[in-house]
């Protein structure tokens, strides 16, 4: 299932990771582990924020995929299913046809 992982990194933790040179290594490891179809980096509520769109096959993948965000980045993390436009069309079509 396509998921979006949102990770908000607190300013102090992010500053320290930049100063000690590990933020880029952690981000590269996350990209390697998630293999996202898209990844975006921005600000949200004043925090450095990452959005990763990736495919998760099993809920048991949550601990190995998410713990680094909690432990290494001290991030606030959310994970939720998402659809692309084609999947939305399919879902709405199924809704209207009653299947």
Image (spheres, rainbow, N blue to C red):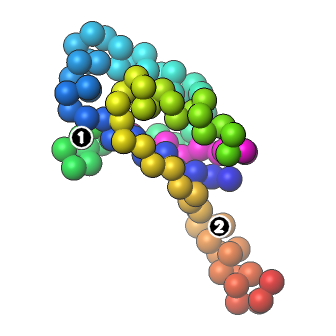
**Label at residue 12:** none
Residue labelled with disc 2: 86
Residue labelled with disc 1: 47
Q: Quadrant of the C terminus?
A: bottom right
Q: Helix, strand, or loop for circle 2?
A: helix
Q: Nearer the viewer, residue 49 or 77?
A: 77
Mark 2 or mark 1: whose residue is earlier in sequence: 1
Q: Residue at x 29, y 18 (%)?
A: 17
The reply to whether residue 41 is visible in this rendering is no
In the rendered view, tell whether residue 15 sits above or below residue 48.
above
Q: Helix, strand, or loop for circle 1?
A: strand
Left or right: residue 25 versus residue 18 is right
Q: Residues within 10 Å of mark 1 (few under 14, many from 20)?
A: some
Q: Position of residue 98 (x, y in %)?
A: 77, 89
Secondary structure predominantly adopted by residues drawn in magenta = strand
Q: Position of residue 96 (x, y in %)?
A: 70, 89
Left or right: residue 7 versus residue 91 is left
Does the magenta-highlighted stretch encompass residue 55?
A: yes
Which quadrant of the figure has residue 23?
top left
Q: Position of residue 34 (x, y in %)?
A: 58, 34
Q: Residue at x 60, y 39 (%)?
A: 62
The span picked out in magenta is 50-58
Q: Residue at x 72, y 44 (%)?
A: 58
Q: Residue at x 36, y 36 (%)?
A: 75
In the rendered view, tell whether residue 81 sits above or below residue 70.
below
């Amino acid at each position: 299932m396509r998921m979006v992982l949102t990770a908000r990194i607190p300013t102090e933790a992010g500053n320290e990771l930049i100063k000690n040179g590990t933020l880029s290594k952690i981000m590269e490891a996350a990209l390697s582990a998630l293999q996202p179809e898209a990844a975006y980096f921005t600000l949200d509520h004043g925090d450095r924020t990452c959005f990763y769109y990736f495919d998760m096959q099993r809920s048991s993948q949550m601990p190995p995929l998410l713990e680094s965000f909690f432990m290494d980045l001290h991030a606030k993390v959310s994970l939720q299913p998402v659809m692309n436009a084609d999947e939305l069309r399919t879902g709405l079509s199924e809704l209207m046809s009653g299947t």
